[in-house]
Image: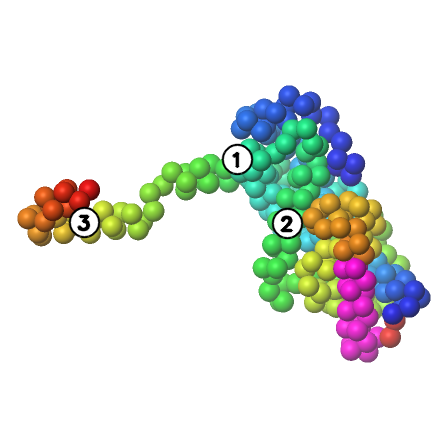
């Protein structure tokens, strides 16, 4: 889904817009994996990402008559997925926030530098979990996942400049939090 | 915060939260869960809210208790 391209023909998109369940299933089959991956990047919790993928496609189905078939399905789905993920982050209580253990349990492309002290990793994860959800999402997508700012902006429904500002604010808050925990970056 | 600090924080963040692998996928087929949610939503949409039943019951009790008011109600409908 990164480029929003789709192998689903335009007639299928039109049928989905008209409420055809088979067309919706075809779109689901094609997009469930990228939508799940996108949500997982934001919430960093595999079980929650599965539930939120279901929630996202439920929202997509409810909004089918607002979909415009002349535009690609992928970015539209990603915007809805991002909103669902942000709603989930906002609803989380501090005791179930992201921990270093949860971060380490994810299917990762690389497990990070084993030389880094576990304490620093843990404190960084803790500081990250204290960030406001909108800053967390921008920082994790743009910095950790290295997604293009343009795509992050489209998913969050903000401008590229606003993404850069959120990332900057997130990094500044992280530095302050780490300093308060006794870590000088 | 200078560029060096910014890069250092980015590095710490990447080490604390390793990126998710590109081909991550759910452990189960989520389509049945989506269908179940759609069905539950449809059933909920067609269900009559409890308040409506309570209102209807109240009106019925009132009509039985004070049958003389029925023509007045019908007049104003």
Residue in the image at 73% along x and 59% along y: A136
Q: Mark on residue B35?
A: 1
* Residue A155 is one of the magenta-drawn residues: no
For this rendering, which residue is in front, A5 or A98? A5
Which residue position holds label 2?
A83
* Residue A177 is one of the magenta-drawn residues: yes
Main SS of the magenta segment?
helix
Q: Residue furthest right?
A: B4
For this rendering, which residue is in front, A178 or B29? A178
Distance CA(mark 2)–CA(mark 1): 21 Å
Classify residue A71 as left or right of residue A19. right
Between circles 1 and 3, the one closer to the viewer is: 3
Q: Quadrant of residue A67?
A: top right
Find the magenta span and give its range.
Answer: A165-183
Q: How many residues crowd around disc 3 within 10 Å: few (fewer than 14), some, or many (20 or more)? A: few
Whether residue A18 is situated above or below residue B50 in the rendered picture: above
Quadrant location of the N terminus of chain B in the rendered image: bottom right
Residue in the image at 47% along x and 36% along y: B39
Which residue position holds label 3?
B59
Q: Residue B72's x, y, as percent?
A: 11, 46
Subunit that carries the residue with mark 3:
B
Whether residue A18 is situated above or below residue A123 in the rendered picture: above
Classify residue A109 as left or right of residue A29. right
Distance CA(mark 1)–CA(mark 3): 38 Å
């Amino acid at each position: 889904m990164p480029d929003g391209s789709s192998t689903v023909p335009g007639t299928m998109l039109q049928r989905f817009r008209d409420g055809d369940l088979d067309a919706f299933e075809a779109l689901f089959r094609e997009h469930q994996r990228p939508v799940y991956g996108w949500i997982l990047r934001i919430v960093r919790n595999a079980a929650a990402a599965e539930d939120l993928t279901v929630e996202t496609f439920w929202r997509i189905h409810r909004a089918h008559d607002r979909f415009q078939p002349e535009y690609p399905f992928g970015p539209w789905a990603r915007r809805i997925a991002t909103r669902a993920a942000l709603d989930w982050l906002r609803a989380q209580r501090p005791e179930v926030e992201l921990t270093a253990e949860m971060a380490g349990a994810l299917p990762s492309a690389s497990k990070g530098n084993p030389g880094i002290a576990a304490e620093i990793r843990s404190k960084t994860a803790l500081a990250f979990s204290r960030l406001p959800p909108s800053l967390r999402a921008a920082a994790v997508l743009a910095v950790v996942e290295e997604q293009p700012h343009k795509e992050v902006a489209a998913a969050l429904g903000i401008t590229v400049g606003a993404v850069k500002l959120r990332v900057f604010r997130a990094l500044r808050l992280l530095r302050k939090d780490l300093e308060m925990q006794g870590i000088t970056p | 915060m200078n560029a060096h600090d910014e890069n250092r924080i980015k590095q710490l963040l990447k080490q604390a939260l390793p990126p998710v692998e590109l081909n991550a996928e759910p452990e189960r087929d989520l389509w049945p869960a989506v269908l179940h949610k759609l069905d539950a939503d449809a059933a909920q949409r067609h269900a009559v809210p409890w308040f409506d039943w309570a209102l209807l019951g109240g009106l019925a009790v009132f009509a039985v208790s004070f049958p003389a008011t029925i023509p007045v109600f019908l007049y104003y409908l």
